[in-house]
Image (cartoon, grey):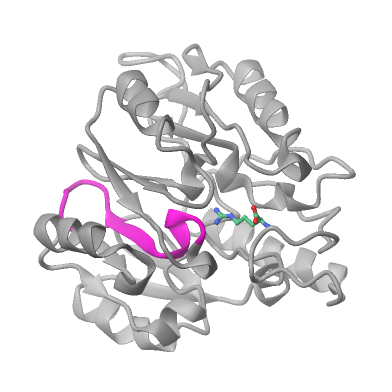
Amino acid sequence: MCPPTYFRVTYSINPWMDPGKPVDLPLALAQWEELRDRYRSLGHTVEELVPRPGLPDMVFAANGATVVDGRVLGARFTHPERWEEAAAHLAWFRSHGYARVREPQHINEGEGDFAVTASWLLAGRGFRSSPLSHPEAQEFFGRPVIGLDLVDPRYYHLDTALCVLDDSTDGEIMYYPGAFSPGSRAVLERLFPDALVASEEDAMALGLNAVSDGRHVLLPQGAVGLFEPLRARGYEPVGMDLGELLKGGGSVKCCTQELRGDPAGPGGTGTAGL
Ligand code: ARG
């Protein structure tokens, strides 16, 4: 995670961003700290990336890389406003013992567009990550990539429209169908017939921009319609207020990059956590 020290809305690269709207920075910081502290109180390890002035979107750390099995695929951003973030993430991994780090050839916005199930990578395209990043990720991680076409600019990243609830299986996700092309919707129905299907209202509260550890699901508190269905499936929903960060078009998941697997590789001695 990266604190929103320099968070502002000074440009607009998604429909949620209105540069005319002021941001309450102390409130943004307090909301972010509450999320970080909540992870810690649930027993997760949180590493912090040092924020850099002039990179207001750096708080959305999910976009900086994708880490699976201790392997790191760096990011390459679409918009010049965010280009420099990629190097900050790569430097962090290199200085924290990650032996298998790849600088990407094609544009991908990290976990904004890659979601991990037990054996697959679900990969969004249409607004940010290039379709060419999909075969690149498949080759690097050795996992089948399922490409999904995003069609609604409000859901410009996969993680605004879909959340993996349990990555120990290939079955448990929640998603908002309206964000996807008809063909991609059919793919999701075929692969995830038991998925929790979110309403437009909950999607608009960025309710799919959630993080699950397989038991607790941290999600924007405004997505009120998701709480009961999550409980009915045995999850414990934890509502978070990230209202200030919503002005940048992000919430819980955008602020959280997940570190999966051991940095030193199978059998290594590194540590892993959120
Ligand atoms: N303002 C940022 C952008 O448009 C928000 C990124 C949100 N991150 C995410 N993982 N969806 O790039």
Lateral position of residue 52 relative to residue 136, left or right: right
Q: Quadrant of ligand 1?
A: bottom right
238 lies above or below 120: below
Which residue lies at the image location 73% right of the left edge and 52% below the top edge? 57
Q: Position of residue 130 (x, y in %)?
A: 47, 38
| Along the line of sight, the residue nearer the viewer: 271 or 192 | 192
Q: Position of residue 79 (x, y in %)?
A: 69, 44
| Along the line of sight, the residue nearer the viewer: 148 or 225 | 148
Whether residue 161 appears in magenta in the rendering, the answer is yes
Which residue lies at the image location 31% right of the left edge and 67% below the top edge? 175
Q: Please indicate, yes or no, whether residue 69 appears anywhere in the rendered image.
A: no
Which residue lies at the image location 62% right of the left edge and 16% below the top edge? 94
Q: Please indicate, yes or no, whether residue 205 appears anywhere in the rendered image.
A: yes
Whether residue 173 appears in magenta in the rendering, the answer is no
| Along the line of sight, the residue nearer the viewer: 87 or 263 | 87
86 lies above or below 23: above
Lateral position of residue 180 relative to residue 201, left or right: left
**Which portion, as a residue range, is magenta?**
156-172
Q: Position of residue 272 (x, y in %)?
A: 45, 32
Q: Position of residue 131 (x, y in %)?
A: 40, 37
| Along the line of sight, the residue nearer the viewer: 200 or 234 | 200
Q: Which quadrant holds residue 252?
A: bottom right
Lateral position of residue 193 relative to residue 36, left or right: left
